[in-house]
Amino acid sequence: MALALDGRAMRAADGSLRIVIRLEGDVMQLQLPARAEAARKDGLWQHTCFEAFVAGGDTASYCEFNFSPSGEWAAYGFSGYRAGMRPLAAEAVAAARWEHGAGFLQLDLDLRPGTYIDRAADLPWHVGLAAVIEERTGVLSYWALHHPMAAPDFHHPQGFTIELPPVAAGRATHR
């Protein structure tokens, strides 16, 4: 199936993060879940979902955010690579808006990772954007802006390829 994943991020001085993740292609061939109440749910990666990973400064800690087209979401903090996982409070997810049309599926996010990662104005943030795609046949594929290893690993810090400079330099946007 021919698909393309794209994304961009913008960091604000208040510790918030605006992210857009867009999948283009034959999205009619995807298995999309039915709409549900916007609520926390674990295991979203087992079906179609978009994911954002955010690390601050030069520390090993990072946040993971998962969003299903159903409206369900999950947010976790990690103290290091796949270590020390803990759920993040609902306040970390300010807004998630899905748009679905002929040939695309898009997620617009407003996140508040700044309360969980170092948000000092003089430190950059690194963001990784990814998607788990389930075809109508049940086949899963793993998409990211960058896969640093042969096998997909969204948690790998080298996959956090969007670098957002310190906010002291003004608003930062990357595509």
Image: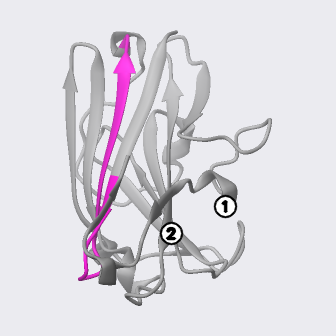
Residue 102: x, y in percent?
22, 13
Residue type (three-letter) at the residue carrying disc 2: Tyr
Question: Residue 160 occupies which quadrant of the picture?
Answer: bottom right
- Magenta stretch contains residue 76: no
Residue 126: x, y in percent?
51, 65
Residue 72: x, y in percent?
33, 50
Residue 161: x, y in percent?
55, 53
Considering the numbered disc 2 on the image, is that residue within a helix, a strand or a loop? strand
Taking depth in this image into account, of 147 and 172 the one nearest to the observer is 172
- Magenta stretch contains residue 24: yes
Q: Which residue is mark 1?
A: 157
Q: Is residue 24 above or below residue 66?
A: above
Q: Is residue 68 visible?
A: yes
Considering the numbered disc 1 on the image, is that residue within a helix, a strand or a loop? helix
Residue type (three-letter) at the residue carrying disc 1: Pro
Residue at the image position 60 percent from the left and 41 percent from the top: 146
Direction from residue 138 to residue 49 in the image, left or right: left
Q: Which residues are magenta?
A: 9-26
Question: Residue 59 occupies which quadrant of the picture?
Answer: bottom right
Badge 2 density bin: few <14, some 14–19, many ≥20, Cα 10 Å: some
Magenta region's main secondary structure?
A: strand
Residue at the image position 50 percent from the left and 17 percent from the top: 135
Direction from residue 24 to residue 110 in the image, left or right: left
Question: Residue 99 occupies which quadrant of the picture?
Answer: top left
Residue at the image position 22 percent from the left and 26 percent from the top: 100
Q: Which residue is mark 2?
A: 76
- Using the numbered discs, state the Cα–Cα distance from disc 1 to disc 2 in whole angstroms: 16 Å
